[in-house]
Image: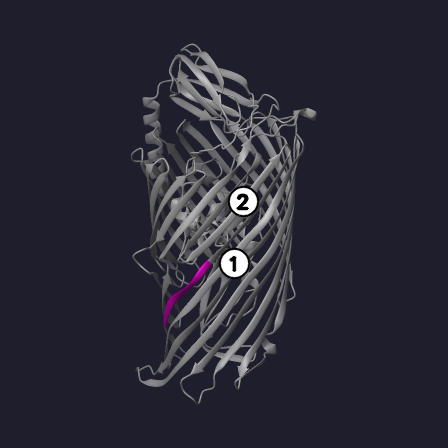
Amino acid sequence: MKRIVLILAAIICGLNVFAQNSTPNKGKITGKVTDAATKAPVDYATVGIYKQGSASPFNGASTDPKGNFKIDNIAPGEYTITVDFLGYKRLTLEHLVISDAATSLSLGNLLLSSVQSQLKGVVITANAPTVENKIDKLVYNPANDLTAQGGVALDVLKKVPMITVDIDGNVELMGNANIRFLINGKPSGIFGASLSDALQSIPASQIKNIEVITSPGAKYDAAGTGGIVNIVLKDSKVQGINGSVNLSAGTRLQNGAFNINARKGNFGVNAFFSGNEQLNSTAINTSDRTSYNTARDTVTHLFQKGSSNFKRTGYQSGFSINWDITPKDQLTAALSFNHFGNHSNGTTNIDQAIFSPLNNPLADTMSLSHSNSRFGFNSKEWSLAYKKTFNKEGQELNVLYSATYGSNTNNYSLEQDYLNANTPATGSISNNPGRDNETDIAVDYSQPVTKNFTIETGAKAVIENLNNSVVTQALLNGVYVPNPFQTYSFNYKRNIFAYYLSTSFSLFNNFIDGKAGLRYEHTSSSTDFPNTTIPSYGIFAPSFVLSHKLDKTETIKFSYTYRLERPEYRDLNPFYNISDPHNISTGNPNLKPELGHNFELGYNKSFNKGANIYIAAFYRYNTDDLQSFTTFYPTLKIGDSTYNNVSLNQRYNIGREATTGINLYGSLPITGKLSIRSNMFFADRITNNPGSPQVSGFTYRINLNASYQFADDLAAEFFVNYRSSQKGIQGTNPAFAFYNLAVRKQFLNKKASIGLTAANPFSQYVTMRSTTFGGNFDQSNTRQVPFRSFGISLSYKFGKLEFKKDKERDDNNAPVPGENGG
C-alpha cells in the first residue's frame, strides 16, 4: 500500500507542477442562476463564455444544484456570457471585462425567464459524461451503453468502475462482496432474498444511473463493508405527459419495460411495469473429489458429471405520486410490486470408489441422481416521504416511512438411484416457505451555519421480522414419509436504531472541501431456534472525506470510513439444503458482524478534448471477516438421516482480512467518432485465520469498451472483460472472460431506436474451473455456463413536454425544472 501511495503521490505532484508552470495567473467569473418567477435556483443550466464579437464559445460551465457557477483561467480581455436552460429564454451579458487589476468578476444573481409557449415534439439530447467523479461518490450514466441495451442491471454493473460481476451474477466492489444495494437511495426488500435474481429482474432500460459510494458518510447506513451501490431508476418531473417503451428479444433473454409520467402544475404521477425471462439453458457440471477418512486407512474418490437446466423470470410494477403542497413542502408516495424466481432440474452421474492406502479397490458404487429445485419471491413495498425547505438556502427537513412485505418459497426434490439392484433408492423432498417484513423510519435535517459550513443530523429505526418453516419428507422403501427431525420453524427479529451527526465544509478559502461525521447504530436480535442466543451490540462509525481541487481539471481526495456487515437471514438460517447429498449447505445462527476499516486515496484529471482519468488506491481490513468455509465429513448425521462423504458449506467469522489495491479508469476520445474506455483493478488480499497459515491472493480485472459513431443516429460498441482467478483460504475461484458486440440505429428524431446485440458469438460456453481443499479432501470443479446469445431491442419515447409558467398561485408556486429521464 505504501508503494502504491508513493507512486500515486509522485504522479499527482508531477501533473500539478506541470499545470502550475504552464498556467499563468488568470481571472474568473462567478454567478448564480435563478428562476425569475419562483426565485428557485436553476441547476444544470449551461453557461457559455465568448470573446466579445465571437460567435463560438471557448469555455463554459454548468450550474450546481444551488444554481452557482464558476469559470476560471480567463485571460484579460472583453467577453460575453450566455445562460441557457430548456424552457427558458437565453440570457446574454456583454462587454464583461477581465483585467490585470480586476481578475475576479462576480455577476451576482442572474434571473432566467421561462418561455410562455408550449413546445411540441421536443427532442432532448443530453451528453452527460459516462462517468462522473464527485466528492463522495462515482456516478455511471448508461444512456449510451449499447452492449447493455435489452439487458438487465447486472449487464450495466459490468461496465461500472471498481465493480466486478462474475458469470453467476455475484457482485464485488473493490474486491468485497459485502455491498449495500439501494434503489433510489432507499433500501429494498428484493435484495434480501437473492441479490443475483433481484439484479436480473431490473431491466437496463429502467436505469437512469448507478452511484458507487466506496466511502459512505455518516448519513448512510453503516451496513456493507464493501460500500454502497445505489441504482437510480428513470423518472420525469417536467410538465406534460411523456413516457417510453422498451422491448427486447433474444436467444437467452427477453425483456419488456413501460414508463409513463404525467405532471400538471404541482402534481405529478409516474407508473411503470417491467418484466423479463431468461430462457431455459443447460449448463454442464463436473466435480472430482479425493477424500480421506479419520483414520486415513481408506481413500474415497467421488466423481460427478451431469447437466442442469435453468430458467429465471421476474417482473416489477409500481407507481408514485409527487405533490408540491406549497413551494416549500413536498410529499411523495410510492407503491411497488416485485416478483422473481428460478427453476432448475438436472441429472448427475455419480461414481464413488473406495481404495486402500496401496490404491487397491475396496468398493465402487455408481448411481444416477435426479434433482429439481424451485425458488420464488414476491414482495410489495410502499413509502411516504415528506420534504420541507426553508427560506435559508440549504436548510432542509426530510422524513421517510417505508415498509416491505416479502414472501418466498424454496423447494427441492432429490432422488438417487443406484445401479446395484441390492441398494434401495434414496431421496428427499423439502418445502421451505418464509416471510420477511421490514419497516424503516428516518428523519434527516440539514442546517447551513455559514456559507462554507453545514451541519446534518438524523435518526433512523429499522424493524425487521423474519420467519420460515421447513417441512421435509424422506424416501423410505420407495415411499416418501414425513421426517420430523428435519421439520421445524425458525423465527428471527432484528431492530436497528441509529443516530448521526455530520458536517460539510470548505476550509482555507475553498482550498479543501470535505465531509466528516459520526454515526451510532445499535442492533438487537432474537430468535426462537433452540440453544441459540444472538447478543446485542452497538458501534460508533466515523467517516470523513477531504477533497482538494488542484486546478479546474484536477482533484485529489482522501477518505476513511468504518463499517460493518451484519449476518443476513440466509446466513443465519439453520435449514439444511440437501439437494446434493454430497455437497450440503446450511446457515450458522452464531455468526457475529464483520467490522471493516476502509481507506481510499483518489485522483481525478480531465483534459481539454474530453479525456478523463481516475485513480483510486485503497487499503481495507476487516475483523471477524465473514467467509464461506467447507468442511468434509466421512459421515454426517442430520436428524435421523446419515449422509456419507459430505462437503458441508457454512459461513464463519474468519479472523482478519486485509486488501490493498488500485483501480484505474480512463476515457479517451481517439477521434471525433471513435472513443475508448478502460477500467483496470489490481488487488492483493491477505487472510489471517487463527490456527491456519496466512493466505495471500492476488487478483486483477481488466475491461475495454470501444464505441464508434458512424453517423449522428448510428453507433456501434465493443466490450471485453477479463477477471483473473484468486487464491482464497480453501482454494481458488475461477477466472473468466467474455465479450459483447452491439449496434444501434436511431430514427424519428431520435425518439425511437433499434439495436442488435451479441454476447460471445463465437463460443457457446464460458468455462469456469475452481478448486477447494481442506485437511482431509481435495476437490476440483468445472462448469460450462452457456453464455452465447443474440438479441434485438426496440425503444420508443413518446409525449410532449410543457415548459410554461404556472398560473399565479400563493407564493408564485412554479415548479423547478428537473431532468427528463423518460
Quarter of the image for residue 393 reads: top right
Q: Does 792 lie within the magenta span?
A: no
User: Where residue 193 appears, x then y in whole percent?
Assistant: 55, 58
Relative to the observer, which residue lies in front, 742 or 602? Answer: 742
Q: Earlier in the sequence, mark 1 or mark 2?
A: 1
Relative to the observer, which residue lies in front, 279 or 719? Answer: 279
Pick the quarter of the image with the N terminus.
top left
User: Where residue 700 appears, x then y in whole percent?
Assistant: 35, 51
Residue drawn at the location 33% of the way across and 85% of the way down: 361
- The residue lying furthest to the right in this view is 810
- Report whether 489 appears left or right of 298: right
- The residue lying furthest to the bottom in this view is 422
Residue 286, above or below 167: below
Residue designated by label 1 = 194
Relative to the observer, which residue lies in front, 409 or 152? Answer: 152
Real-space Cα separation, disc 1 to disc 2, in angstroms: 25 Å
**What coloring was used for the rendering?**
one colour
Q: Which mark is residue 259?
A: 2
How many residues crowd mark 2 within 10 Å: few (<14), some (14–19), many (20+)?
A: many
The magenta stretch is 278-288
